[in-house]
């Protein structure tokens, strides 16, 4: 097993390239199942979650080939409709294959998904949406069995704007005759990216980024090449790192408008930020002012995937901050680890009351989940003394060579074999 060894207290200076968005790549890889042709995904990154999705594609009879940051997927010889527990339970995004497999194979047998331990993460909206669109869906012995009862499109309303359910239904609806409309859908940038990919393959999808998405299905999809948007959560993680450690860092290949809530908060409290084309320059003295209140919500609200990281920032900001997590009831396991570093945090329901301190202290830490792990990396970069961070495979799910990027900015961080 590997762990990070970090010596804190160094400012961050230099340039960092933001990689392709994990949460775009995962549904786009699933949607390649819809295409009886080769597709080419540019700006792709072998995050471990992406590699797990490629394994699922191969298990269905498809092919996945890497050429640097180009991922070529070929589902011409798809021969199976089953995703086993062994591969499905590794990632949350395995559930995103249910709609595409059903669309392509007219039957599907998919085991329950895995994913970060940040809450119950039910899939009722996925399954209920498919049933509304005429699929037969039965849950039995840890698997979801699905078949097609009605081939015509229709209307479906999500009781909650779930990202994954929106994507699953978008993909399934490409196989239905006529028009399908999804109401109260998620509006994240990754949904727009998925729409753009499906349209590049000859699909007809519109409305992504707003609350109603319309799909005109029944068209045969063909191969295409698609450049994936940059990862707004990676970008936000690095911006918060500079706010905590001080320094001057230019983020390249970043879309500032995808992080407008974070940028506004950081400009009020911790950083000077200059946006020019696809670069974001962040300048900070490492002494952030009071954050006040940060409340997570569905896009375009403050993203839950940056909650753990901004909680780490609150630990070294002035006065009391309130961090309110509204999406995942168990996205708080990083707090127990931050307390080991001397953080002053109290939990009241889904609200973290954080009393900022000027200093955190290095400690031996264990990564609880992907973004919780990122918050521990940030805290250890700011802390006095050294830290070890175990279970870093969870961080590799959504950050690629994070330690190399941070070291290139002057951080003292190494990936070592666990002693
Ligand atoms: C996606 O997860 C992202 N993952 C998550 O990123 C992100 O935190 C989340 O969207 C919210 O933005 C991927 O895209 C692979 P949801 P997803 O369905 O689709 C409830 C990361 O760190 N819900 O929008 O699973 C659910 O319990 C990961 O990169 C149901 O009740 O999120 C949660 O409370 C973590 N029933 C809320 O909706 C359902 O059927 C939001 O979940 C589905 C979801």
Image (tube, rainbow, N blue to C red):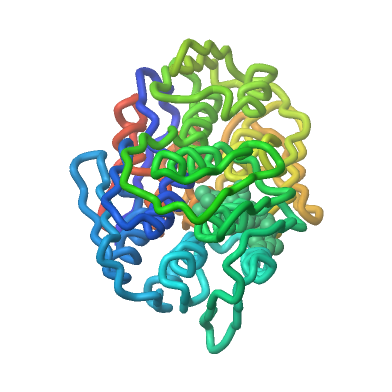
Residue at the limit of the structure toward the right, as seen here:
348
Question: Total of numbered circles in the picture?
Answer: 0
Q: Position of residue 37 (x, y in %)?
A: 28, 53
Quarter of the view holding residue 213? top right
Q: Residue at x 41, y 41 (%)?
A: 386
Q: Position of residue 322 (x, y in %)?
A: 77, 39
Q: Left or right: where does residue 400 sit relative to residue 300?
A: left
The quadrant the N terminus occupies is: bottom left
The quadrant the C terminus occupies is: bottom left
Q: Left or right: where does residue 119 sit relative to residue 32?
A: right
Q: Residue at x 61, y 58 (%)?
A: 165
Residue at the limit of the structure toward the bottom, as seen here:
141
Q: Position of residue 178 (x, y in %)?
A: 60, 54
Residue at the limit of the structure toward the left, as seen here:
67
Quarter of the view holding residue 86? bottom left
Q: Position of residue 123 (x, y in %)?
A: 62, 67
| Pick the front one: 136 or 128 | 136
Quadrant field for ligand 1: bottom right
Q: Residue at x 70, y 59 (%)?
A: 329
Is residue 49 visible in this depiction of the protein? Answer: no
| Pick the front one: 259 or 319 | 259
Q: Residue at x 31, y 37 (%)?
A: 42
Quarter of the view holding residue 286? top right
């Amino acid at each position: 097993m590997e762990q990070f060894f970090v010596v804190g207290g160094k400012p961050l200076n230099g340039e960092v390239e933001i990689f392709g968005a994990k949460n775009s790549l995962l549904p786009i890889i699933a949607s390649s199942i819809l295409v009886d042709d080769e597709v080419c995904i540019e700006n792709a990154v072998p995050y471990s979650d992406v590699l797990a999705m490629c394994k699922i594609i191969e298990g269905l009879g498809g092919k996945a080939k890497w050429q640097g940051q180009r991922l070529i997927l070929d589902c011409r010889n798809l021969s199976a409709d089953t995703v086993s527990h062994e591969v499905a339970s590794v990632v949350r995004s395995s559930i995103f294959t249910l709609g595409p497999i059903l669309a392509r194979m007219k039957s599907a047998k998919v085991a329950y998904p895995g994913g970060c331990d940040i809450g119950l993460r039910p899939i009722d909206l996925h399954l209920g949406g498919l049933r509304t669109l005429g699929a037969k869906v039965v849950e039995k012995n840890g698997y979801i069995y699905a078949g097609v009862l009605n081939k015509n499109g229709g209307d479906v309303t999500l009781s909650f704007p779930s990202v994954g359910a929106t994507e699953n239904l978008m993909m399934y609806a490409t196989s239905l005759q006529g028009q399908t409309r999804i109401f109260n859908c998620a509006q994240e940038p990754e949904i727009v990216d998925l729409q753009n990919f499906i349209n590049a393959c000859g699909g007809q999808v519109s409305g992504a980024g707003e609350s109603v998405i319309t799909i005109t299905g029944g068209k045969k999809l063909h191969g295409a090449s698609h450049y994936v948007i940059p990862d707004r959560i990676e970008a936000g993680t690095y911006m918060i790192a500079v706010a905590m450690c001080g320094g001057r860092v230019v983020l390249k290949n970043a879309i500032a408008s995808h992080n407008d809530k974070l940028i506004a908060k950081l400009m009020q409290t911790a950083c000077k930020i200059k946006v020019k084309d696809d670069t974001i320059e962040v300048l900070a003295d490492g002494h952030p002012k009071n954050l006040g209140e940060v409340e997570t919500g569905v896009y375009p609200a403050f993203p839950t995937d940056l909650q753990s990281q901004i909680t780490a920032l609150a630990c070294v900001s002035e006065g009391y901050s309130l961090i309110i997590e509204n999406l995942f009831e168990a996205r708080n396991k990083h707090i127990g680890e931050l307390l080991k570093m001397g953080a002053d945090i109290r939990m009241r329901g889904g609200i973290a009351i954080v009393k900022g301190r000027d200093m955190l202290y290095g400690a031996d830490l264990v990564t609880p989940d992907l973004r919780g792990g990122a918050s521990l990396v940030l805290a250890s970069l700011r802390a006095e003394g050294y830290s070890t961070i175990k279970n870093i495979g969870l961080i590799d799910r959504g950050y690629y060579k994070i330690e190399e990027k941070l070291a290139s900015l002057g951080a003292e961080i190494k990936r070592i074999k666990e002693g």
